[in-house]
Image (cartoon, rainbow, N blue to C red):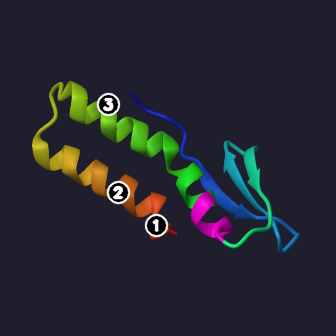
Amino acid sequence: MSHTPWQLQRTPYESEIDIVSDGRVIATVEAGEDKEEIASLIAAAPDMLEALELVVERKGFDIEYIHYRCRAAIRKARGEDK
C-alpha cells in the first residue's frame, strides 16, 4: 500500500502547525505544551499504518526492508525526520 506523505508545515501563526498532504491541510495542531510532538505523531500515522501492514502481511518483503520502514515511521513519529 502506498500513500501520499503527510508533512508538518508551520503556519503564519506561531501557535499552530498544519499537517499537509498534496498541498491540502489534513489537520491543524494548535498551541499547547507538546504541539510539536503531537503534530509529528499525527503526520507519521500513514507511515506507521503502512509499516504495520508490512509486518502483518510480509508479502514479498524481506525482514530488513520491513525493519527499515518501521524505523523510518518511528523516527517520523518522534519528530526526528525533518
Q: Residue furthest right?
A: 13
The residue carrying pointer 2 sits among few (fewer than 14), some (14 to 19) or many (20 or more) residues within 10 Å by Cα, namely: some
Q: Which dot marks residue 53?
A: 3
Distance between mark 2 and mark 1 Cα atoms:
8 Å
* In this rendering, the label closer to the viewer, 1 or 3: 3
Indicate the position of residue 62 as horizontal and vertical percent values: 11, 39
Please provide the residue range marked out in magenta.
Answer: 34-38
Main secondary structure type of the part rendered in magenta? helix
Indicate the position of residue 30 as horizontal and vertical percent values: 79, 61
Q: Which dot marks residue 69?
A: none
Q: Amino acid at mark 3?
A: Glu
Is disc 1 placed on a helix, strand or loop?
loop
Distance between mark 3 and mark 2 Cα atoms:
14 Å
Q: Amino acid at mark 1?
A: Asp
80 left or right of 42?
left
Q: Is residue 55 magenta?
A: no
Q: Note whether 16 is above or below 23 in the view shown.
A: below
Residue annotated with mark 1: 81
Distance between mark 1 and mark 3 Cα atoms:
21 Å
- The mark that comes first in sequence, 3 or 2, is 3
Q: Amino acid at mark 2?
A: Ala
For image coordinates 41% across by 44% down, the residue present is 48
8 left or right of 66?
right
Residue annotated with mark 2: 72
